[in-house]
Amino acid sequence: MSKSDNYVKAGDNVVIYFTDKKKWLVRAKADEKLHTHLGYIELGSTIGKEYGSSVKTSLGERFWILKPTIIDLILKAERKTQIVYPKDLGMIASMTGISSGFTVVEAGTGSGVLTTFLANLVKPDGHVFSYEIRPEFIEMARKNIDRAGLSDFVTIKQSDAKKGFDEKDVDAVIIDVGDPWTLVRVAWEALKGGGVIASVSPTMNQVEKLVAELANVGFVKIESLELLLRNLEVRTGMTRPSMRMIGHTAYLTFARKIIMHEV
Amino acid sequence: MSKSDNYVKAGDNVVIYFTDKKKWLVRAKADEKLHTHLGYIELGSTIGKEYGSSVKTSLGERFWILKPTIIDLILKAERKTQIVYPKDLGMIASMTGISSGFTVVEAGTGSGVLTTFLANLVKPDGHVFSYEIRPEFIEMARKNIDRAGLSDFVTIKQSDAKKGFDEKDVDAVIIDVGDPWTLVRVAWEALKGGGVIASVSPTMNQVEKLVAELANVGFVKIESLELLLRNLEVRTGMTRPSMRMIGHTAYLTFARKIIMHEV
Amino acid sequence: MSKSDNYVKAGDNVVIYFTDKKKWLVRAKADEKLHTHLGYIELGSTIGKEYGSSVKTSLGERFWILKPTIIDLILKAERKTQIVYPKDLGMIASMTGISSGFTVVEAGTGSGVLTTFLANLVKPDGHVFSYEIRPEFIEMARKNIDRAGLSDFVTIKQSDAKKGFDEKDVDAVIIDVGDPWTLVRVAWEALKGGGVIASVSPTMNQVEKLVAELANVGFVKIESLELLLRNLEVRTGMTRPSMRMIGHTAYLTFARKIIMHEV
Amino acid sequence: MSKSDNYVKAGDNVVIYFTDKKKWLVRAKADEKLHTHLGYIELGSTIGKEYGSSVKTSLGERFWILKPTIIDLILKAERKTQIVYPKDLGMIASMTGISSGFTVVEAGTGSGVLTTFLANLVKPDGHVFSYEIRPEFIEMARKNIDRAGLSDFVTIKQSDAKKGFDEKDVDAVIIDVGDPWTLVRVAWEALKGGGVIASVSPTMNQVEKLVAELANVGFVKIESLELLLRNLEVRTGMTRPSMRMIGHTAYLTFARKIIMHEV
């Protein structure tokens, strides 16, 4: 990436960073201010600055201008649904191997957070087809995906996933709905042989029903897991795990489609 | 992805899957056998079969033919070094946002496992420059990266990373060496403003020194963490977390480069 | 405790300690040898020695003589059943407050491991009444409790706990059986008002049924939890959590009996 | 315990329980009220009631009267210092085996929370000698220990533990200070051969220094660990680990004294 790309342009999404607790995702717009407890900054003053450099607030505090990562965009996305956490997004990426060129079907667009993450993985030559039945979510998801600049890699379909997916021979199906077991058969039909299914569910009862259905419909290598994220508070001579910790977000389940014709 | 691509060709890497404990990564070669405790299979018999279908062993057991994911390739790679685990690879993917088009510098190629994962993320239009001083590792890494079909996206350099990286304005620097704090300054010099650094270290003492140096050299948004992976043993009416669990693999540290010129 | 008590007497249980992986619980007997990979020791040679001092093996290695703690006795007890781990035993002690003078009913003596621990807490003026239906366990449990010197504080009853406990107005009921929900009503009948119930169960499904029954029969302050034990490998400058870890032992559930007469 | 003991007497500590978030530890006093968001209750009205029964508030809500366990007393104790958590208290109980009859020395009385727990374990025929240099803590600790009815089993000494303990041949030394390594030698001198030392420390740097000193002074079976407590949210068909969790409280270190005279 050439250095000349690394300057804020009008309209860019930028992270204004003070501390991990005090950071903002804003648009670099000429006539707007960001008001904080440490003074305001003129957002227009960020335009033309190099990413990684700083601006001062009206009270003289220095804030840093960072280009948002995909996670910055996701964590600050507008949403009505439970977020999928970075640890879980990453595990979906590594366990499914979804990367550029993959064709992915997603059931349950929701606010488009997971959709955005998947689109960023499959670009520039793959695609995400995302199914959502609730119209009120689709607009929000489109806005979030657009903000991340990933609309070209996503098609949202307002349709009941239970009735089946239009796509066939896809590489992966990602399920993020409350009753994932109801989508196992249609996922099997959409997947190519050996294709990957992944599902995100908060309760163990959901996982029980899902895993039974996966084995029943024709999947192997079924694995359910969860990740616990622990921050380390690092101070020289006083290092310790953080007191605060999220106890549970979701179980992740992965499996591979098999074809049961006679051998 | 068209269905016609989904058939085993001679020379392909294939996963032969029986159970999570009994699975093999092999080449589909006409004259070779895979010997197992459940009989052998003629590897040539997999050629032309659809992925997801099965072969029977000489003793009549059915094994499944799966296309290896990037993690299958990584976990079965030849190596002399400690592996980086899927949970940690995924977290690096999500926290750095490394995706297609990124220019990434890696310090410590080792067996090429992390290199392979990064190359799979940046393809088709990004690149990984990986530094390794020990010649005995470079050959092994090349072999592993080649097996994953990712050689076009990786340049391995036999050079001491402490002397600096040739690349400038890169998007991310990934450090996987025992003394990561010695590479913070050269990483800073290679990164573009706001660029991401990530490091993998097993001990708290390494993290302590690394974090102090990051703050000293010019990074913000410094975060150290670890992930604990817990498998769920799912059986209807008898679901419980697994008895066995890996207690610790590594701490991951992330930060963003800042530019300290006067404001 | 006077120092004169701190010497090995013939017949005492002693721990012979070399490392955490190499330690033995033996009787100090005149004519017996302990054979190890580092040579043998004459067990008679420990008699009269002060606890904390050492003996040398026939190959000149120094082993330490330690008085067994209650956990040393428990972890080395003969058993046919899944052990209850020190972390879980400790949590039962702290959450129930069982201490000297308590009257405790236990359902499911098993190998007597939990019984032994409870007896050590209630001595010298409390008592544990333990119910076990399987005769083959009772003998083993008696032997284990006797070895720990705690027989005076335990009464084992060969009886089906589902039919009810003989004791009334007890302080605590501890349940260690596979179908704990079947004992909630009889536990309620045995407990005094406000008395504590505690149960040990490996699966989430057991906990679900148990908690529903507790709320139904008349308990409040119902709490289910598990503990994850993580060892720290401490070496100066190289400190890290252990690679090995037990992923799950059991869920513990605690509640207090309420009396539902009209107010 | 006879049923007649199970009634509230004037002046008793009682827990008034509504939910886990709404519970109070109060004295049953004739002329006092407990004001809550659900109305008030006349505390005098609890006198003569059976534990486990209920009282109604002025607004008609039913609250339960429970006899406080040792943990209820500890968690509601007045304090100026970081609490020691039930999971850690329990692990100290099980790993040290401290029980009735033990002589225990504690360094760092603080608010007396750990002292109270230890006294409850050693009663009726053991004793805790607790050292505290800061006079402002001693009064608070005395009050907390007295409230738990355990004053007979505790002697608090205002003295600098670094200068040594008066007691000799004690069964266990418990260290709860910020620089535990400074007390290892005096602990060794106070302990009987084979005696147990336990220490509570939040940072890994404290543990590093402590463990090095333990090995140096003459301890074996040195073990450092931590416990992670995870609550399970149990609802039929919707069971999952709690979202909220404490990430870290303290590392616990245990060891046994050895006597290094020549063999």
Image (cartoon, coloured by chain):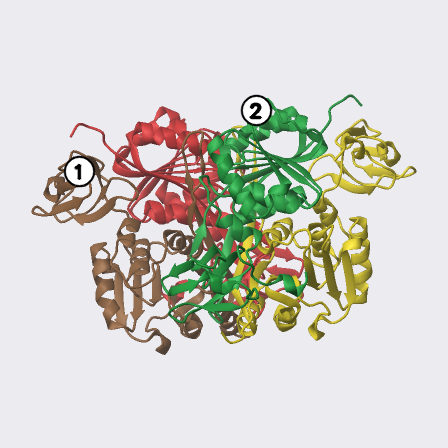
Chain colours: A red, B brown, C green, D yellow
Is residue C153 found left or right of C136 in the rendered image?
right
Is residue A100 found left or right of D170 in the rendered image?
left
Q: Chain of mark 2?
A: C
Q: Which residue is mark 1?
A: B4
Task: Looking at the picture, tell me which residue is in the foreground, D1 or B152.
Answer: D1
Q: Chain of mark 1?
A: B
Q: Quadrant of residue A195?
A: top left
Residue furthest to the right: D31
Q: Which residue is mark 2?
A: C162
Residue furthest to the front: C31
Camera-side mark, 2 or 1: 2
Residue A48 vs A73, above or below: the answer is: below
Tally of numbered tags = 2
Q: Find residue A69 and report its horizontal and vertical position in percent.
A: 45, 55
Task: Looking at the picture, tell me which residue is in the foreground, D188 or A245.
Answer: D188
Q: Find residue D160 and report its horizontal and vertical position in percent.
A: 74, 72
Residue C203 vs C2, above or below: the answer is: above
Q: Identify the residue at horizontal 55%, vertical 43% (top origin).
A: C145
Give the quarter of the figure containing the N terminus of chain D.
top right
Packing grade of label 1 (10 A; few <14, some 14-19, many >=20) is: few
Q: Find residue A29 and report its horizontal and vertical position in percent.
A: 54, 55
Distance from disc 2 to disc 1, alpha carbons, whole Å, reads 63 Å
Task: Looking at the picture, tell me which residue is in the foreground, A238 or B95.
Answer: A238
Q: Element under label 2?
A: helix
Three-letter residue code for mark 1: Ser
Q: Is residue D173 visible?
A: no
Q: Find residue D203 and report its horizontal and vertical position in percent.
A: 58, 64
Packing grade of label 2 (10 A; few <14, some 14-19, many >=20) is: some
Is residue C199 found left or right of B202 in the rendered image?
right
Q: Is residue A73 visible?
A: yes
Q: Element under label 1?
A: helix
